Image (cartoon, helix red, strand yellow):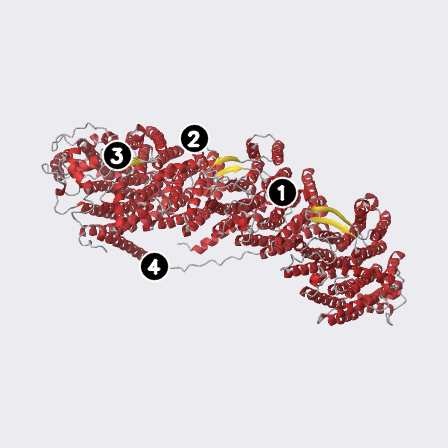
Amino acid sequence: MMTNRFLILVPILFPLLCGLAVAFAPALQAGSRRRPFVLFSLGGTFLSTICVLLLLRGHSLHLCDLAPSIELRFAVDEITCFFAGLGSFMWLMSGIFSMEYMQHETNHTRFYAFFLMGEASMLGVTLSANYPTLYLCFEWMTLLTLPLVFHIQSEESIQAGIKYLLYSFAGAFAGLMGIPFLAKYGTTLNFVHGGVLDPLLTEGHEGLLLAVAFAAILGFGAKTGLFPLHAWLPAAHPVAPAPASALLSGVVTKAGVIAILRVIYYLFGAQFLAGTWVQTALLTISLLTVFMGSSMAFRENIFKKRLAYSTVSQVSYILFGIFLMNDTALEGSLLHVLCHSLAKGGIFLCAGTIIYKTDKTDVRQLRGIGKEMPVVLWCFTLCSLALVGIPPMSGFMSKWYLALGSLENGFPVISWLGPVILLISAILTAGYLLPITIHGFFPGADFDYSTLVKKDPTLWILVPLLILTTLAAFTLFPQPFMALVENTTEAIIGGMLS
Amino acid sequence: MKLFLILPILLPMAAGALSAWLPLPSPKKRDGFIACAVILNSLLILLLILLKPSGILTLLHLTDSIVLSLRLDGLSVVFLGLIGFLWPLASFYAFEYMEHEENLPRFFAFYTMSYGITAGVALSANLITMYFFYELLTLVTVPLVAHEEDHRAMRAARKYILYSIGGAALSFVGIMMLYSRAGAKDYIFGGFAPVGEVDSYLLIAYLLTFIGFGVKAAIFPLHGWLPSAGVAPTPVTALLHAVAVVKSGVFASIRSTWFAFGPELLFGTWAQHAALFLSAFTILFGSAMALREQHWKRRLAYSTVSNLSYILFGSCLMTSAGLSAALSHMLFHGIMKITLFFCAGTVLCKTGREYVPQTEGLGRKMPLTFATYLIAGLALTGTPLLPGYISKTNLLTAAAQLNDPYALFGIVSLLLSALLTAAYLLPMSVRAYIVPEGSSLSFTEKDRDPGLRMLIPFGILILAMVIFGVHSGPLMDALSTLVHG
Amino acid sequence: MGSNLFFNYFEATAVIVFGIGFTILFLDRNLIKKVIGFNFMDSAIFLFLASNGYISGRVSPIFEDGVTAAEHYINPVPAGLVLTGIVVSVSVTAFLLALVVRLYLRYHTLEMDEIVALSRKEADE
Amino acid sequence: MKQPSRNVARFVNWVEGEEVFPVPEEAERNQKPRKKKAPVKAKPASPEKEKRIFALVYDGISVVVCLTVILTLLVTVSWLPRFGGQDNPAENEVYIRYLEGELEEAGAINAVAGMILDYRAFDTLGESNVLFIAVCSVIILLRADRNRKTGALNIPELENRRALQPDDSIFRGSAALLVPIGILFGIYVILNGHLSAGGGFSGGAIIGASLILYANACGPEKFERAFTFRTYQWISFFALMTYTLLKTYSFYTGANHLESHIPLGTPGAILSSGLILPLNICVGLVVACTMYAFYSLFSKGGFGNGQ
Amino acid sequence: MNLVQNFPFFCIMLYLAGGVTCCVLTPKASRAVCIGLNLLVTALMAAALAFTVRSGESYVYLMGHFPAPWGNEIRIGPLETLMGTAFPLVMTLTLLGGMDHIFEDVEEDKINLYFTVVNLLMVSMLALVLTNDIFTGYVFVEINTIASCALVMLKYKSGKALVATTRYLIMSLLGSGLFLIGIIILYNITGHLLMEPMREKIHELYLSGNYAFPLTVTVGLFAVGLSLKSALWPFSAWLPDAHASATAASSGILSGLVIKSYMILLLKIFYRVLGMEVVLSTGVLNVLFVFGIGAMLFGSLHALQERDIKRMLAYSSVAQAGYIFAGFGLGTAEGVLAGCIQILVHAVTKPMLFSAAGGFMTVSGGSRQFSDLHGAGRRDILSGIAFTVGALSMIGIPLFAGFATKLVLTRASLATAGWKCVAALSAIVLSTVLNALYYIPAVALLFDKREAVHISGVKAQPSAVYVLSLTVFMALNFFVGLRSSLLTCILEAGLNVFS
């Protein structure tokens, strides 16, 4: 059964090779042949990922040793299944969307090459089984998604790209801080369920290790837009083309979440961090980000910038759940990962379509858009409901669990302050998403229907939109999803606490 | 067998001297002569490394106890390997680059002679011989720095002389202090200074040698000469200030720390703390200055200042892990930095652009050069799959081993410096390729990729980087075995 | 302060003259005065030296008709030294005066400061 | 005295001289402009007031130097052994041997002559060479060059000084009387150097003085025909050469403990006390010629037309 | 008493005779006599050196029939013979190096006097090194003074030379005046003039404690007098003018040899006459040490700002004299050894530098200013190389002579404890840097491509003699640099038997 262990690499190598082929193979330069090839490669990746997740669960592969102490190791465990599937699915959807959308843009080869290679690195992050490999894939994800940011080559996009690069590198280097100390105080650098710290060695050095953990988490938090290193997100996401920004918000932020999960639950161990000043600090920061993100989004008028700020706050919901470190909160946050990826992906795609069709970037110009593009706006409305957390959509379920988890936790202030802030932020989310729908559908009296032109997009755009919107309401038929979430939570946190 | 030790020193010096005097008809012939001399010497070094002749070859008795002698041991193999590998590349690059410069015979004479003397520094068997070659290296490289003989070059040369001779004098006093206490002995792994109780006399001696050799390794207060020596032609800055001269400073410092004073004596003492603090601070200072500097080659020079202190920091940790990390960074930095200098030099030689803001959009015209520059930049920043990451991780792990506040400060400064390196290297490459539509950029037809003779070194260097980046296991094992003598 | 100051009144005067001569030679600005100062100094030294050898109640060391008892004569060594000293000081004074003559012929002044100033102004040949 | 701070600043600038390279303007961002220090204006003191202050200070210093030298030496003198004391340290075995052993070893009646020409002969040899080198230097300085044009000394004053010879008869008459007596007395003093006070140096001086008197009184023409520069050179050459050779012989025999067969003769007789007499004659010749040479060089810049 | 032991005495007498004969010969003949004599003396002294080194102890040579306290004598040991060999050898080379300058600067019919002065200067130096009697020392100090002043003033056309000679003569006379009165006081309190008997008397006085004050004053007088004559820093105002305005050969002789003979006399007086414990008790060595350190720094600082090549070299002589006195001032045997080595090293290097400077002047229209000397090294390549070798050895680069001093002086200062060690070490480092600061730009300037417009293109045709002297000088420099262990052991043997 030796061969099948190498199959783990397929989800990473396949998109990588396809990306390189798109970039360099002369045959694929022509648009007509490139589009089917891209679709084929995205679909192939999605399928291969699903197969690997199902078949090779629990297997690990020690690829090679970069240096005596640094080894590359990949494995499929519960987090991989959850995130890899989600990620590859989202990549497929936005890939399909981009077929149509890219007519609007130039130099497609570069876009698609890095689009595919970005997916490879994202899957690498999910599949990595020890700290150095995680760090490697993390860095290469930044580098490979960078060209997507400054794709439109405007001065603003280049500056945003450089800002994105430097912030992620800052975060990555802070994350790198963990490796040496774990090499000294931990038994191994591989992810071990429940943490690798060797109690004997860490006897007198808790303070130091806590600081290192805090730095690592804040470092990896940069990708998720956590407070200290969040400034790049509102700048980078809007300038990227729609499919890219959808992925950046939807999936790349989740890579940061994976890293933080690994650091907390698989490296330092939840018992080590629970109840310490690190946990309280992280909780306060995440709540601060939640509140700040939604208030900034509320005041922002440029459509995609508003959505970027909303990503900042939504991802902090997830982090809040993770930092609470109990099973219900974790369940809530994993649910919110699903909800946010699907919904935010959908919303960004809608926004992209609107801009693609009508070139209106400012929110205030969107009066009566519902009339021109009813289907798109319906999808937009449903997804925003999911984000706001109105019952039929998934957002409500995750926020519910998060609130329960926060109350269960015994923290003096944060246990009740958490739900309050979640509530306020939900209201603010509604405040900045729903007016678009309202103005879109009810333009008011003076809207002259005569010049109205139906601008509904082609199927390439509508199909992914509809799929995402329906999925965003997965809580209608929660059974499969809830099962997935529960056993993932059980796998991550089971048996550790309480 | 021992006699072979003198050859790598004498051969290039003889070749250099001859090339200046022999009435070679055409520059091409002279280039050929120099090329074969350099290659021959590199092969000789390779032979020496493989054969590893043991025993000490004494050259001269200065006084009864002080003797000039040569020996090949683990550490010198590393340094010899580095210069043996890089010097032919640099020479090839120099042939192409120096075509339009004048008084070349003198340039190539001194250029080749410095090869021999750097080999001398590597092969020396005790502190005084190393000091002896160290001083000669200053003398031989002064004409190279002052090659253009214009006002700027002379000023840079004068500053170079002042710092180097000042540093050498300091280290000489340190060496003599050590000799007065421990007797004029040869190198032994683990040092020959009397361990006993911690006496501040030897610690002061160590600090003097550290600062003395630190001048060439561009330690913070005494780094001034390296950026201003950027005025020299690129082969000089690339080879000498990225590899030979500064590396001999670092090599000398490692030798004096590990083979003369010995880690047992210095471990945990205030001297080690001072050395750690100084190198850690230089790491930060160098990168910060590099970020602020707009002149391209001075920026790379400041980056060398910071990277050299990586190596010093590693060696000052006084643990074998630290030393092997330092040695690995010495090798990798040599390769990475020489590539960066070559790219900068090619752009300067082809387009005459010296300042970073002027390189915007040049990537489209010189894709290969800037591709190499991007890869080397990524390597230096420490992105995985490239050598920078490996040596940086080793350094961090080694520093984390000893729970010492200064080592912690070192770790923080290493990471901050990595960020600053990213800040001063990567945006440049981004802006070179990606140019906003509206901007009006004037390009002459000269702005295109250099000839084949320059591209070959680029190719070889990138290959070396990727190989070391991905598969540096055997190299690291070799280093750790060397470290144990 | 020793006890013999008032007994060694010859050496005391010699020393005072020596001090004056030394200072004149060292610090005076006129060349001729310097030469005079030098002679002051030398003759003071010879006085000091001669008074050294003197033993009261004894005769100069030229033997009268075969009397060679040492207690009869004074110490001859200082006398010999004075002789050498005088010849040395004569020759040095001659040399100094020759220099002064040449300097005067060239700069027509005897003040050392002016001579130095003039020589500095002269274009270097 | 330059202010030291300006010096140090200049030194630092000179070394650290951060040259601002010719930078195209848009790369100007990080070069700080170097601000010029305001030049320090010295208070314009009037020159002669300054000179007076300087003179005052100068005299003050010289008084201080003089006093310090005198005081230290006076205190030293106060500690020295008493003047004319019997048992001074100087009256040790050296003094006794010189006096008692002098007759047998040197054979000179005049113990001082014996001491300077036999016991401590090396000093006297050196000392006559001091005389010789002094004459050489004076010749270098004052002797007018034979081919007048290049010599720096063909200065008009020297020329007309020859002309003003006073020809008053009284002076010439008394000189005619004194010169022979002087020379005779000089010869006597030289020859009796080892028997009575005097010796080569004092006799030579007397002869030299009478020669100068003669040259002055009877005009240089006649005398200088006989006594030209060449004759001077050869006389001093022979005298010094014999002196050195004699002394080499005596030192060599002394050092190697050989018996130097120089007869001491009977004390008191003219031809007694070994080498002292010939040495006295040589020294006398040298000193006489040197005195005359000094006179002629200083007065006429050379030995008359005979050069 | 085999023949070899007479050689030093013969050398002295030969020089005296040579001095006198040169006065009557023609210029060409007197040159031949002088050079021949110097070579002969070098050979004789080398034989004497071999003998003393083999026998390993110093013997006394009676000047006359009478032993110690009565007669006069000279004392010959390994140190004295080594200096005795080195001085005439360097003198020959300097004369050969500066020969064409001598025939150009000195008036035609006074050249034989030049060689007379040179011979008498050599006799005085040799006597100072060998003599064992203080008053003989004084007599030969006087010969030395007059001869060296005569050497300075021989550049007849320049008024500057005369002024410099006068100032030099006056300062020297002050020095010898103090020296003489010191001798007389010593004679007064000890009754002897010869060094060994005087030593015993002083030892008794030191133990018994009487005449303590006169003894200290004498030590002070000797120290001030002789350091005044050997241009120790605070008293060195006269040296730059004197050495710069003389001809190339004379300045080489003055810097290289003359000031060294006084140092050896001072060393002899401290070692042999007063004895180390008396000198140490008076603390005069600390004063000399401080002045030495001052000389090392201020000499170089002045040289730094000098725009005239010969004045720069003269100031650098002041700095190097500082090395020697710092060595003596350390007060230990190894310190004195360092001082002696520096005497030899400087004697070998500085005359070469002055001859090379002379060569540059001939090629740059006789001007001494650096502004005219641009590219002079290119025009006269041999002087250029010689100057570079000299400069590098002054800085103390290994492989060159200067490094030997730096090595031994550092070891010596490390052996002493406390403030002296720190001061010496920092002075060494600082002066190395300062030396580098003014020598290397000078070398760079000499090899500069941009030549002064009115001089460029003048190619030098050096005479065979000049080429020979510079090459031998360079060989000597490398020999001292590489084989300094040979010199150190001879000097060590010499110092052991010196007192």
Q: Is residue A17 left or right of residue D49?
A: right
SS at badge 1: helix
Q: Residues within 10 Å of mark 4 (few under 14, many from 20)?
A: few
How far separated are the C-alphas under marks 4 and 2? 58 Å
Q: Give amino acid for label 3.
A: Leu
Query: Is residue D225 left or right of C69 when viewed as pictured?
Result: right
Image side of residue E52 versus residue A45, left or right: left
Name the amino acid, label 4. Lys
- Residue E136 can be seen, yes or no: yes
Q: CA distance from mark 2 to mark 3?
A: 39 Å
The alpha-carbon separation of the residues under discs 3 and 4 comes to 63 Å
Instruction: Name the front one of labels 1 and 3.
Output: 1
Residue B334, placed above or below residue A233: above
What percent of the width, then of the height, locates residue B87?
62, 39
Q: Which label number is shown at residue E468?
A: 2
Instruction: Determine the CA span between mark 4 and mark 1.
Output: 82 Å
What residue is disc 1 on? B481
Q: Residue furthest front?
A: A200
Q: Is residue B152 visible?
A: no
Judge by depth and name the residue closer to the eye, C26 or A113: A113
Which residue is disc 3 drawn over? E62
Q: In this rendering, is residue E135 above or below A439?
A: above
